[in-house]
Amino acid sequence: MPSFSTIRRLVLIALLLAAPLANAEPAGADRHGEQTCPMATSSRPLRPLPQGPDGSAHSPSPAAAPAAPSPTAPDYRHLLETTPLGWPRLDRWCVWVQPPGEPGPGLRFEQRWQQAVDGALGSWGSELSLVMVNDPARAQILIHRRRPPLLDDQGRRRASHGRALLELLEVERQGAWRPEPRVQVLLSPDQRLEALQATALHELGHAIGLWGHSDEPGDAMAAVPGAQPVLSLSARDRATVRWLYQQPSRFGQPP
Ligand SMILES: [Zn+2]
């Protein structure tokens, strides 16, 4: 039977051995989404759904009409927009964030920007599955450190610090084509930290499928921000996203 001091020594050795592993990923973890987020080898705009002889869509698709307001739940589901293929959401999103540039005078701003993005990813990540990847070809959400252009995609003049742009694509990954939403988020780094955090939270809310605006200023997805920047999700934001993620969607599913 080992003596007490031997046990203590063994425990110490075990602790020393375990220490470097404490920060490492558990065995089999997918550190950069290599397995959970396979590389896109090709992509193309989503084709219109085949039309039946009566002009109706050939294959049944979830309702493209906006949701009816909830009779009981305090959320804003009825203000969201959907797509012909159903709600633009995935069971798991692969997210690419523009990495910081070379060290230099701008690095401090880049770090602040990164902090705001991380905060927003953490907030939404508590409600759904986000996997970070370091290759844009693995991602459906791409977050760029860039001021949005003055003209939006419909040619309207619109100065803003953040914008989210949705494309509906068919993407080939591991030899299989699937419909996917792809969202480009443009987030300007030149804002104060709180404003940056609120913008990141709001634009990421669009990216994960909340295509619409809440009618209450205390929500992250408020159409008109209130006096205070919204830095965390409200109960209504959470209720809306939980409802959304229970809805059927053909995105990410085999055709
Ligand atoms: Zn918005």
Image (cartoon, rainbow, N blue to C red):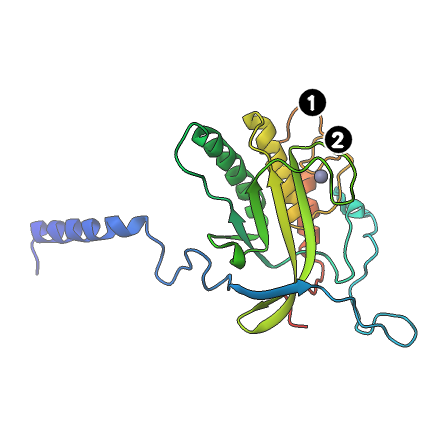
Q: Name the disc covering residue 227, or none.
A: 1
Give the mark count. Answer: 2
The residue at which mark 2 appears reads as 224
Image quadrant where one finds the C terminus = bottom right
Amino acid type of disc 2? Val
- From the viewer's side, name the closer residue of 24 and 196: 196
Residue 45, percent across and down? 70, 62
**Is residue 78 visible in the rendered structure shown here?**
yes
**Is residue 128 visible in the rendered structure shown here?**
no
User: At 74% from the left edge and 45% from the top edge, which residue is drawn?
Assistant: 153
Placement of 39 over or under 75, stated as above or below: below
- From the viewer's side, name the closer residue of 248 and 212: 212
Image quadrant where one finds the N terminus = bottom left
- Element type at mark 1: loop
Placement of 60 over or under 112, stated as above or below: below
Left or right, residue 15 beside residue 193: left
